[in-house]
Amino acid sequence: MFLAIRTEIGCSVVLYHMSDFFVEVWYSPEDNQIALVHGFERRELLEPYLEMIDLAELIR
């Protein structure tokens, strides 16, 4: 499920929720390529998104 998008160091960073974990996909428009796919479970890594999305339904 798509949750949010932000910009970081020239990349578009898209956050997805994948049932039991989250995934960030870093896309570089300069190279027109995916630069990184980062999966994680630690809620602390959601900090950059907290003002953009309501995670109440996902984190129970």
Image (spheres, helix red, strand yellow):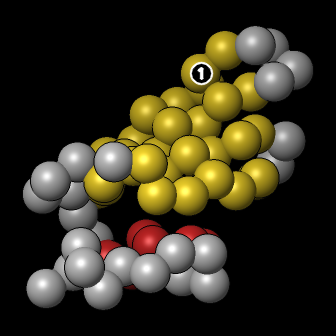
The percent coordinates of residue 51 (x first, y second) are 62, 84
Classify residue 41 by image quadrant. Answer: bottom left
**Quadrant where the C terminus is found in the figure:** bottom left
The percent coordinates of residue 20 (x first, y second) are 12, 57
11 above or below 44? above
| Residue found 56% across the figure and 46% down from its top | 14
Q: Give the left or right position of residue 4, taking residue 1 as reference.
A: right
Under circle 1, the secondary element is strand
Residue most toward the top? 32
33 above or below 11? above
Numbered marks: total: 1
Instruction: Note whether residue 46 is visible.
Output: yes
Q: Dot 1, crowdedness within 10 Å: few (<14), some or many (≥20)?
A: some
The percent coordinates of residue 5 (x first, y second) are 63, 53
Instruction: Note whether residue 47 is visible.
Output: no
8 above or below 47? above
| Residue found 54% across the figure and 82% down from its top | 50
Disc 1 residue type (three-letter): Ile
Viewer-closest of 26 and 59: 59
| Residue found 76% across the figure and 53% down from its top | 8
The percent coordinates of residue 34 (x first, y second) are 59, 21
Q: Circle 1 sits on which residue? A: 34
